[in-house]
Image: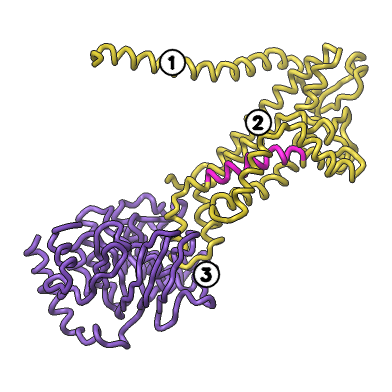
Chain colours: A yellow, B purple
């Protein structure tokens, strides 16, 4: 039997360990944010948001250069990915959660987990085979499809767990007043779970928005802004993570700086979408 | 405890004798099961239950935990359809028609046979008003006047109207447990069911709320036929006209509540009612 004092000390040690691990978890994030800002802030200028990149010579000759085409391209490709992945992912999640006895579900679950564990570069290859080869060109669509493969399993799994968190009794209550099954899911379960659903979508979005590998041979990259918006969808298009990579490995110090600035924008982009979604889904009723 | 039951039964006697005829009158049967069995995989939940339920009467299902009361109740509006591996055999007749007939849509059956659960189940994202009229609004009825009328009627039937009439747009989850349960009852009544199944509706409530719901059952039976599962024998004595005693998945005995409580035929019923087990 330990004395009260020993137990007290042990408790203090455990709590301290928890606090230390929390700090260790937060530290890399803070370091990244700090480092990115210190290095990139000087390259953020009006030109950065309004000009296209062009050739390396452009910067060396002192002509204005920026990443407007990359920012717009990222919005286009990520939006396409969301459009492809969210309906299918939510559908799969509803299937897993609301029809747990369905005979397709064990297969669906295994496939979903496999897709989630698959390296992102292979998803790029898949999109290359499915979209780029038949279309004969790199394109924003192909990039969107590749990123959708990244999002899909995350959306499906998070939808499942968000819906499962709603007590089963709510479904029975819906059925008991003579509502059809789909009505119960649509009008009572999904609204109750919407906070979790959007959080899941955001996690998927944030994951996909930071992926460069699946885009290498799908959206390919582009130094210039397309003349027409269709060029962004049906032609090669630039995206932030991929541009960040190519700027970082370039031999020009000006481009290195722009790479840091691109990282700030990417970070801000993800944080901003988190904020917007949080506000949009602020619970009308607290449960 | 004993005198309580006796007293309640005396008041019951008066009400039941005048309706006595209906307990033998076939035409007064609203719903009945014939050889109803429910299996979960290989386990048997309910076995071979034949039980008539009379129009505008309250039927109480009593018995120890795990005796199949709830399983039986859930078979009466096809709630078991959701759980794969549950096999229902035998017949459940509602106005003479088998509700398990392949041509019957379970959604229609559940409109006619409503259900109130053990715990209050308000829809968490909806207001009080939207909860009450959910069964109408969510199938496309948009007529404001009609919805308002139904809302008021159902809330009055559930004896909740006066407490919530000034805050119908507030979340249903802001109500107390007892109010939430009456809201669940109002929501069930809004779609005008003919039969109302109640699965231990007061088990999570305090005595005062329990009392209100029991009073409610008394007035509701004028309009609906009620089947109530209860753990509480005094409650069965207070609210029901007919009592059915279940034991390990079997219906041991059924009859007028007065008879079951004062003069049961089976010794197991007597043992349970007198508190020797359960």
Q: Main secondary structure of the magenta part?
A: helix
Please, which chain is the residue tagged with disc 1 on?
A
Is residue B149 visible to us here? no
- Same chain for labels 2 and 1? Say yes or no: yes
Query: Height in image: B272 above or below A121?
Result: below
Residue marked by disc 1:
A17
Whether residue A177 appears in magenta in the rendering, the answer is no
Mark 2: few/some/many CA within 10 Å (<14, 14-19, 20+): some
Which residue in the protein does label 3 denote?
Answer: B141
At horizontal 24% and vertical 59% (from top left) the residue drawn is B64
Disc ID at residue B170: none
Asked if residue B183 lies left or right of residue A143, the reply is left
Magenta span: A146-162
Which residue has dot 2 on it? A270
Mark 1 or 3: the one toward you: 1
Relative image position of residue A251 (x, y in whole percent): 86, 13
CB atoms of marks 2 and 1 within 8 Å: no
Camera-nearest label, 2 or 1: 1
């Amino acid at each position: 039997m330990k004395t009260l004092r020993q137990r007290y000390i042990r408790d203090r040690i455990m709590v301290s360990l928890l606090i230390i691990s929390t700090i260790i978890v937060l530290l890399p994030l803070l370091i990244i944010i700090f480092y990115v800002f210190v290095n990139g802030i000087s390259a953020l200028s009006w030109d950065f948001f309004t000009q296209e990149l062009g050739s390396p010579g452009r910067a060396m000759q002192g002509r204005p250069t920026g990443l407007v085409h990359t920012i717009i391209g990222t919005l286009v490709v990520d939006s396409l990915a969301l459009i492809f992945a969210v309906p299918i992912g939510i559908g799969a999640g509803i299937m897993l959660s609301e029809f747990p006895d369905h005979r397709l579900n064990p297969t669906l679950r295994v496939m979903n987990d496999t897709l989630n564990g698959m390296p992102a570069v292979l998803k790029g290859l898949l999109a290359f085979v499915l979209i780029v080869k038949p279309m004969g060109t790199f394109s924003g669509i192909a990039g969107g499809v590749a990123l959708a493969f990244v999002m899909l399993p995350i959306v499906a799994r998070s939808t499942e767990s968000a819906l499962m968190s709603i007590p089963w009794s709510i479904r029975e209550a819906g059925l008991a007043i003579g509502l059809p099954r789909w009505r119960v899911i649509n009008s009572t379960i999904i609204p109750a779970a919407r906070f979790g659903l959007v959080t899941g979508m955001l996690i998927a979005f944030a994951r996909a928005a930071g992926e460069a590998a699946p885009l290498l041979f799908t959206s390919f990259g582009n130094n210039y802004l397309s003349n027409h918006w269709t060029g962004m969808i049906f032609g090669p298009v630039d995206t932030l993570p991929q541009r960040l990579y190519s700027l970082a490995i370039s031999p020009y110090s000006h481009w290195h700086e722009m790479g840091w600035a691109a990282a700030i924008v990417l970070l801000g982009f993800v944080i901003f979408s988190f904020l917007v979604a949080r506000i949009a889904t602020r619970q009308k009723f607290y449960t | 405890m004993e005198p309580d039951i006796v007293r309640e039964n005396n008041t019951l006697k008066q009400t039941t004798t005048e309706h006595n005829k209906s307990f033998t009158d076939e035409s007064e049967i609203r719903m009945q099961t014939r050889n109803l069995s429910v299996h979960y995989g290989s386990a048997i939940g309910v076995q071979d239950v034949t039980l008539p339920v009379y129009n505008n009467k309250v039927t109480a299902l009593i018995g120890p935990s795990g005796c199949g009361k709830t399983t039986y109740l859930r078979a009466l509006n096809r709630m078991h359809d959701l759980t794969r591996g549950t096999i229902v055999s035998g017949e459940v007749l509602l106005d003479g028609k088998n509700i398990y007939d392949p041509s019957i849509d379970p959604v229609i059956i559940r409109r006619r046979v409503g259900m109130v659960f053990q715990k209050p189940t308000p829809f968490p994202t909806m207001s009080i008003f939207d909860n009450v009229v959910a069964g109408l609004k969510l199938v496309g009825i948009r007529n404001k006047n009609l919805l308002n009328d139904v809302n008021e009627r159902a809330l009055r039937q559930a004896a909740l109207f006066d407490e919530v009439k000034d805050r119908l747009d507030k979340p249903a989850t802001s109500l107390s447990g007892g109010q939430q349960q009456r809201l669940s009852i109002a929501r069930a009544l809004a779609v005008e069911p003919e039969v109302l199944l109640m699965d231990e509706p007061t088990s999570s409530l305090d005595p005062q709320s329990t009392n209100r719901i029991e009073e409610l059952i008394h007035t509701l039976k004028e309009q609906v036929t009620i089947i109530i599962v209860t753990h509480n024998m005094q409650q069965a004595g207070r609210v029901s006209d007919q009592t059915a005693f279940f034991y390990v998945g079997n219906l041991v005995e059924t009859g007028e509540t007065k008879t079951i409580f004062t003069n049961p035929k089976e010794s197991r019923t007597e043992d349970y009612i007198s508190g020797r087990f359960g």
